Image (cartoon, grey):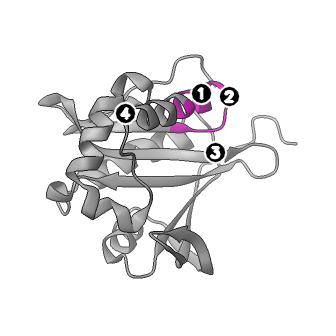
Amino acid sequence: MDSQQPDLHSARLILRPAGPAFAQALLCYQQRNCEHLVPWGPIHTELSSAQAFLAGRANDWGEGRGASYLLFLREDAETVVGTASLFKLERGMMQGCTMGYGIDRSLQGTGLMREALAALIGLAFGPLGLHRIQANYQADNVRSAALLERLGFAIEGRASQYLFLNGAWRDHVLTALINPDFAWADPP
């Protein structure tokens, strides 16, 4: 991958590469949205934990494992309002990754996450040259189901007891989006 992870832009958002410099902003986002985010995954409660997490995500880009972003409204470059990531990036025969995301509770239903994920999909299918993006959601997460459907993701199946979240094993719906313009640069 290029040595520098690019900023991404949408009509209303700037997606900045995740890094330890944003640890306090991430911590504020997660604390502000604790009740909203906990059912979907772990959150950070200590600055040192957020710094370590973001340092790892920054290293993912350089090592070709992923691309993690923090979402900022164009009119407020200081406040994190969401996250969006490509992770488990695989080359070789797979040429794919998994996508994860979350948005501030107060901004649900505004179309901002769709904007952010469209920019991330553009990175995945453009400069990264990937063939496939997978995104999984808990069956009762109707917002994620609708969002992924609007973005063109197709349901491929269900996974029982897929992830241990919020004290229990959670079933997930498995979806994927295939790059219609994929072309091998150098097939395995």
Which mark is drawn over residue 130? 3
* Percent coordinates x, y for residue 58 in the rendering: 53, 28
Q: Quadrant of the C terminus?
A: top right
In space, the residues marked 3 and 2 are separated at their CA atoms by 16 Å
**Span highlighted in magenta in the image:** 56-67
* Cα distance between the residues tagged 2 and 1: 6 Å
The residue shown at (26%, 63%) is: 35
Residue corresponding to mark 2: 63
Residue depicted at 60% across the width and 20% down the height: 2
User: Label 2 vs label 4: CA separation?
Assistant: 24 Å
Q: Which of marks 4 and 1 precedes in the sequence?
A: 4
Q: Secondary structure at mark 2?
A: loop
Question: Is residue 187 in the magenta section?
Answer: no
User: Are the residues tagged 2 and 4 within 8 Å (C-beta)?
Assistant: no
Mark toward the start of the polypeptide (2 vs 4): 4
The residue most toward the top is 3
Where is residue 101 drawn, in percent x and y?
40, 53
The answer to whether 152 is drawn above or below residue 186 in the figure is below
| Mark number, residue 47 | 4
- Furthest-right residue in view? 188
Q: Which residue is mark 1?
A: 59
Q: Are marks 3 and 2 in contact (CB under 8 Å)?
A: no
Q: CA distance from mark 3 to mark 1?
A: 19 Å
What amino acid does circle 4 point to?
Answer: Leu
Q: Earlier in the sequence, mark 4 or mark 3?
A: 4
Q: Residues within 10 Å of mark 4 (few under 14, many from 20)?
A: some
Three-letter amino acid code at the position of disc 3: Leu
Of labels 4 and 3, the one closer to you:
4
Amino acid found under the numbered disc labelled 2: Glu
Q: Nearer the viewer, residue 70 or 7?
A: 70
Quadrant (top left/top right/bottom left/bottom right) for the N terminus: top right
